[in-house]
């Protein structure tokens, strides 16, 4: 069953029908223009979003690289600290042994032995002080 408008359109004079057709075409062109503008805006927003996503990804990669470098540096720093600590422990043991020897040397009555031990302790003490 046909709508009443279609019947009126068929019975209307040609000028009226052309006018209505032109009016509908103008309305369709307006709607098409609005849709094209919305589509362009949507593409623009999509491009902006993609740009922001790429920037965030780049920043995250840089952050992870920096974090990896820091973690690697922690390991290297701990290894260096361990080496230094081993050297310090060795020197502390040597100094402790010399201190014990000097303490025991105070009980030695022989002055020649005291002088020899004192010179050795002095030379070793100067060597330890210069290396530490």
Image (spheres, rainbow, N blue to C red):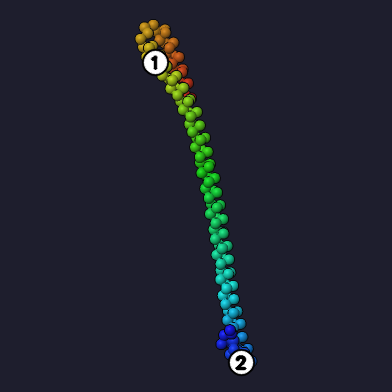
* Direction top: furthest residue: 110
Quarter of the figure with residue 13:
bottom right
Q: Disc 1 marks which residue?
A: 100
Q: Nearer the viewer, residue 58 or 100?
A: 58
Q: Are marks 1 and 2 in contact (CB under 8 Å)?
A: no
33 over 109 or under it: above or below: below
Q: Nearer the viewer, residue 98 or 85?
A: 85
| Circle 2 Cα neighbour tier, 10 Å, few/some/many (<14 / 14–19 / ≥20) | few
Q: Is residue 15 visible from the viewing direction of this image?
A: no
Where residue 22 appears, as percent x and y from the top left, is: 61, 85
In the drawing, does residue 52 fall left or right of residue 112? Answer: right
Q: Mark 1 falls on what kind of element?
A: helix
Q: Is residue 117 visible from the viewing direction of this image?
A: yes
Residue for point 55% across, 65% down: 45
Residue for point 56% across, 75% down: 34
91 over 65 or under it: above or below: above
The circle drawn on residue 11 is 2
22 over 35 or under it: above or below: below
Residue for point 42% across, 11% down: 115
* Direction left: furthest residue: 107
Q: Nearer the viewer, residue 108 or 96?
A: 96
Where residue 117 appears, as percent x and y from the top left, is: 43, 12
Mark nearer the viewer, 1 or 2:
2
* Direction front: furthest residue: 1
Where residue 97 appears, as percent x and y from the top left, is: 42, 17
Q: Of the residues under marks 1 and 2, which one precedes in the sequence?
A: 2
Where residue 116 appears, as percent x and y from the top left, is: 44, 10
């Amino acid at each position: 069953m046909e709508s009443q408008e279609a019947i009126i359109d068929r019975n209307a004079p040609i000028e009226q029908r052309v006018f209505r057709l032109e009016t509908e075409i103008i309305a369709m062109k307006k709607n098409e223009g609005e849709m094209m503008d919305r589509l362009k805006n949507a593409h623009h927003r999509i491009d902006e979003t993609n740009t922001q996503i790429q920037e965030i990804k780049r920043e995250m990669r840089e952050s992870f690289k920096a974090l990896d470098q820091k973690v690697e540096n922690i390991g290297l720093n701990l290894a260096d600290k361990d080496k230094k600590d081993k050297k310090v422990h060795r020197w502390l043991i040597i100094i402790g042994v010399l201190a014990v020897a000097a303490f025991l040397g105070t009980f030695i009555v022989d002055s020649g032995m005291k002088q020899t031990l004192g010179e050795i302790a002095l030379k070793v003490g100067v060597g330890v002080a210069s290396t530490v």
